[in-house]
Amino acid sequence: LKQIEEQEDRIANAIHEMSKPLARYRDDKDLDAYLRAQEREGDPMLNYIRNKQAESHNVIDLTVGSSKPMYNGSYMPNRFGIRPGYRWDGVDRSNGYEKRWFE
């Protein structure tokens, strides 16, 4: 069953490729997408792109089942929504900007 589906996909892709003109130019969207999808050895952004693709395909809730320790007490909200680190002692040492932000 899976092999039949893959064969049908390959046939559909081949028919789609045959319908395109032989000479492909700069404004060809299919060619651009094909070239952008290729991974090149030595690309400095390759790991970043792979991580972004993995994140976009697998949305992981980091708050559930996280192996990192979390701060459990109450804390002042901040404009970025970042929780304090687990070693935070609960003392607000800011200059009050975040408090004024939420007023």
Image (cartoon, grey):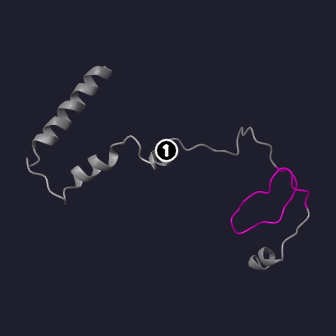
Residue at figure coordinates x 68%, y 65% from the top left: 80
Q: Nearer the viewer, residue 102 or 42?
A: 42
Picture residue at 52% right of the left edge, 45% below the top: 55
Of all residues, the one furthest to the left in this rendering is 22
On the image, the x and y values in percent for residue 57 come to: 48, 42
Few, some or many residues within 10 Å of mark 1 (<14, 14–19, 20+) = few
In magenta segment, residue 74? yes
Name the quarter where the N terminus is drawn.
top left
Where's residue 59, x and y in %? 55, 44
Q: Is residue 67 magenta?
A: no
The range drawn in magenta is 71-90
Residue at 59% across, 43% down: 60
Which residue occupies the foreground of this view, 99 or 45? 45
Q: How many marks?
A: 1
Give the left or right position of residue 36, taking residue 83 as reference: left
Give residue 98's position: percent from left, percent from top: 77, 74
Q: Residue at the spot x=25%, y=22% of the render?
A: 4
> What residue does disc 1 label?
47
| Whether residue 21 is situated above or below residue 96 in the rendered picture | above
The reply, left or right, for residue 15 in relation to residue 72 is: left
The quadrant of the picture occupied by the C terminus is bottom right
Q: Is residue 103 left or right of residue 92?
A: left
Residue with the most extreme front position: 42
Indicate the position of residue 76 as horizontal and vertical percent values: 82, 66
User: Which amino acid type corresponds to the residue marked 1 in the rendered image?
Assistant: Asn
> Could you tell me what secondary structure mostly forms the magenta stretch?
loop
In this view, the residue in front, 81 or 35, is 35
Q: Secondary structure at mark 1?
A: helix
